[in-house]
Image (spheres, rainbow, N blue to C red):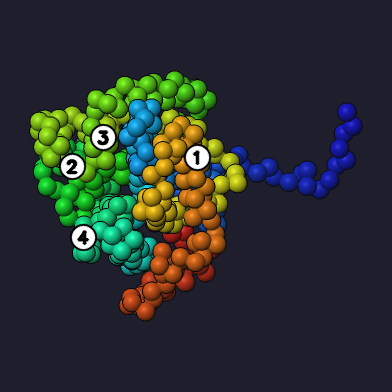
Amino acid sequence: MFKAVSSPGQNRTPLPPAQSPAPAVPSPRRPGEGGGTSAGRRDPFFDNAKYLAIVLVAMGHSWSPIKGGSQFLQGAYDVVYTFHMPAFIIISGFFSRNFDLRPERVKRLLTGVVVPYVVFETAYSLFRMYAGDSEDRQISLLSPYYLTWFLCALFVWRLTAPIWRVVRWPLPLAFGLAMLASVTPGLSGDLELQRVLQFLPCFVLGLCMKPEHFHLVRRRWVRIASVPVFAAALAVGYWAAPRMGGAWFYRQSAAQDMGAPWWAGPVMVLVMSGCALLLTACFFAWVPGRRLWCTSLGAGTLYGYLLHGFVVKTVLYAGGYDPDWVHTPLGAVLVTAAAAAAVTLLCTAPVRRVFRVVMEPRMDWAFRQDDAGRAARARENSAGRQPAFERVGA
């Protein structure tokens, strides 16, 4: 080998050995690593997971009118309902880890959750009255209709996030509240509190999770093991379809409201949560961690969630589920494909631009000017520490 020609730089004092970064200093990450958002960069894994979860939500809603005549479709429906919302809620909790009651974050909560809830609860109620020819002519913001319950729940969960970060045993406490709710009849009347409390452990679990926890379930052996787990879940779902009431999967009723003994409520909370956690881990194991054609759609999943209900209800009110061929295996496949395509379209950028005025409204006129907060942000910007605010979790 030839020796390099000597240069003045070779005689400089050697640099000290590299040290690990301080605990407060983030280390560089490769694409797809880490969690949440960083300045100017989103993790493709979470956007992919949110998109796939919202596709499963739309598929489940499209199956509801046709699942009655097929034991296999009923079983698949129950399996999907076991984990699709828990997966979505866990991600929402994960993105709520830094939520506090600072004015800036409260404003985003009001404009990104409360305003869409009021708009879509009113819109769905009017749509039910006139397009669905419903005899119920009331609009009540205390009784969420159809899929708007998630916005109510997200508002409550996000407000309580600071509490779960300071208590010593957040998950056991959340499970305790969920089990108490399962034995409290009539609790689902206002703000869907039954669902809020029974799904609460999923949100708190997301709050407690760290980026490395998502990496654990994305290992190769977990991905391989998830295949027989899902196969077994479908087999159990097929067997249980004619034997088990589907109301357990919605988590919107107490045990007594479903005609079951009171002790079945806490037991089913633990059983359903265990099944949801297992299937959610298998779901996350197969979510791609790289950028795909659908990754950008993950930023619009709340749009797809709130808008696809109008598509499903329109088809239902128009008699689109009435023909016999729709209830055949081929019909189920076509309905599934149509639901996936529709919700994908509703997550795209053009749709988001049209509905941003009600989904992410700019309402500076409605809030007091935070001069102290603006001054603090200006100091952070001048120091090169641009704060990164996390989105509403969808």
Q: CA distance from mark 1 to mark 2?
A: 32 Å
Q: Nearer the viewer, mark 4 or mark 2?
A: 4
Label 4, label 2: how far apart the Cα atoms are: 21 Å
Amino acid type at image mark 4? Asp
Disc 4 to disc 3, C-alpha distance? 25 Å
Number of residues whose C-alpha sits closer than 10 Å to that of mark 1, classed few (under 14), some (14–19) or many (20 or more)? few
> In this rendering, which labeled residue sits more in front, label 2 or label 3?
3
Of 147 and 166, the residue lying toward us: 147
Is 289 on the left-hand or right-hand side of 77? right
Identify the amino acid type marked 3: Gly
- The front one of 126 and 174 is 126
**Residue that numbered label 1 is attached to:** 334
Q: Position of residue 279 (x, y in %)?
A: 38, 30
Residue placed under numbered mark 2 in the picture? 253
**Mark before the other along the chain sequence, 1 or 3:** 3
Residue under numbered circle 4: 136
- Residue 246: numbered disc: 3
